[in-house]
Image (cartoon, grey):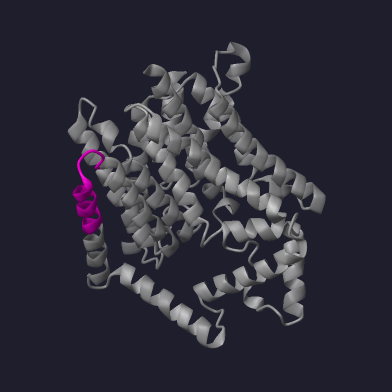
Amino acid sequence: MLGLTSVCVFLFFALALAVTSGYSLGALILLLSSMLLLWKRPRLNLQRRDYLLIGTLLGYFLIYTCNMLYHGDQARELDMPSRTLLAIPVLLVLLAYPPRPAAWWAGLPIGAIAGTALAVWQLCALHMDRPQAATSNAIHYGNVSILLGMLSLCGLGWARQQRHRGAWTVLLIAGGVAGVAGSVISGSRGGWLVLPVCVFLYAFHYTQGRGKHYIAIVLAGFVALSALAFALPESPVRERVAVAVDDLQKFKQNDNVTTSIGQRIEMWRTALELSTEHIWLGLGSDGYMAAKQTLANEGEMDKMILHHTNAHNDYIDALVKRGLIGLAALLALFFLPLTLFAKALRRGNAASRPFALAGVVLCICYPIFGLTTSSLTLNIGIFMLVFPMVMLWAQLRRQERSS
């Protein structure tokens, strides 16, 4: 079983961006493997922290389900939140048979490199304006790419303790660079917001005990690289920033909603306006679309955003569809695991800290992604949150038990 869970974890990341729905293969095998728990009944030795994580995943699903039933939404609305429920048996099987750490740290950079290689081919050979690798959306490709890159860099502390530390270090750094490059190629500006946050976190973590000037050096290096990326001829970063500034100016001058940013602002404004009418339980998915149609018919909303089924912001989308209760469930899904990983990073042993750091990065990236898109309304979005979350937690607990 240890070999099986290790292979599944590796495939989950290695195929995530290079193969259509590649992330689902490893997750599906892990889910099917969890049925063995009913037969073998291994000792899980669950702690209060484990129950808290399980309760967070289960609570999100139950609140989503109750809200759907209350509003009479279609059953397909349960498709995405069901992933949080399915992640629970995967967590249990990983706690019982934790995969080898090398499977995790190898899958991440290989997945980032493979996804970026495919995106470069789409850019150069197919001349796609915004490559998306094997995903259906350039925004989510860019976000997952930079997520894999940031998670890869969390393993540098682990690599230093390995026999082939030079090779592991090169691979993890290559994964980090490839993940950022894939995000830049995709033009997904919202994902770039995680870079300064993660760099500051790395600077603080990796320079502990070396003096504050090391942090300053790392941050100065990041600023210099960012300036260089912006100043390069035909820089995609400068081009996308210029487009964003132009979109904002157009919206400010004449409420132009034909642009990407203009449409987002209009979606946010409309959803916030609708949410005030049903603040506790929201409108439900069908009710949200019906309310938008009414506003459009009355001329109080631009019809350009009528076909969008979400608010392009995880927090506003949860608020308008599921009210304050649904928003609280979303915040718990993001920040309760973040608290658990942050405590482990502060108090854990040296072997568990790389996994705790990766958990913190994961739970920081997703709240930032959610500011400019609805990450949890697509399969890849919610898959790449809850399954890495339980994989990391199982790895962290394994390292704690081993010590």
- In the figure, is residue 201 to the left or right of 344? left
Quadrant of res 308 = bottom right
Say left or right for 141 vs 325.
left
| Residue at point 58%, 56% (across, down) | 314
Which residue is more in the foreground, 105 or 120? 105
In the displayed structure image, the side of residue 188 where residue 48 appears, left or right: right
At which x and y percent is residue 123?
34, 62
- Quarter of the image where one finds residue 307: bottom right
Report the residue at 57% width, 63% height from top. 312
What residue span does the magenta drawing correspond to? Answer: 207-221
In the displayed structure, 145 sits above or below 299; it is above
Q: Is residue 328 above or below residue 11?
A: below
Residue 216 spot, x, y in % from top left: 22, 54
Magenta span includes 391:
no
Q: Quadrant of the C terminus?
A: top left
Magenta-highlighted stretch: main secondary structure? helix
Q: Is residue 383 visible?
A: no
The outermost residue toward the bottom is 254
Residue 155 % position (x, y)? 31, 37
Residue drawn 69% across the image and 61% down it: 320
Residue 56 seen by the camera:
yes
Coordinates of residue 124 in the picture (x, y in percent): 31, 63
Q: Residue at x 45, y 33 (%)?
A: 392
* Residue 293 shown left or right of residue 266 in the figure: right
> For the image shown, how many numbered marks are present on the structure?
0
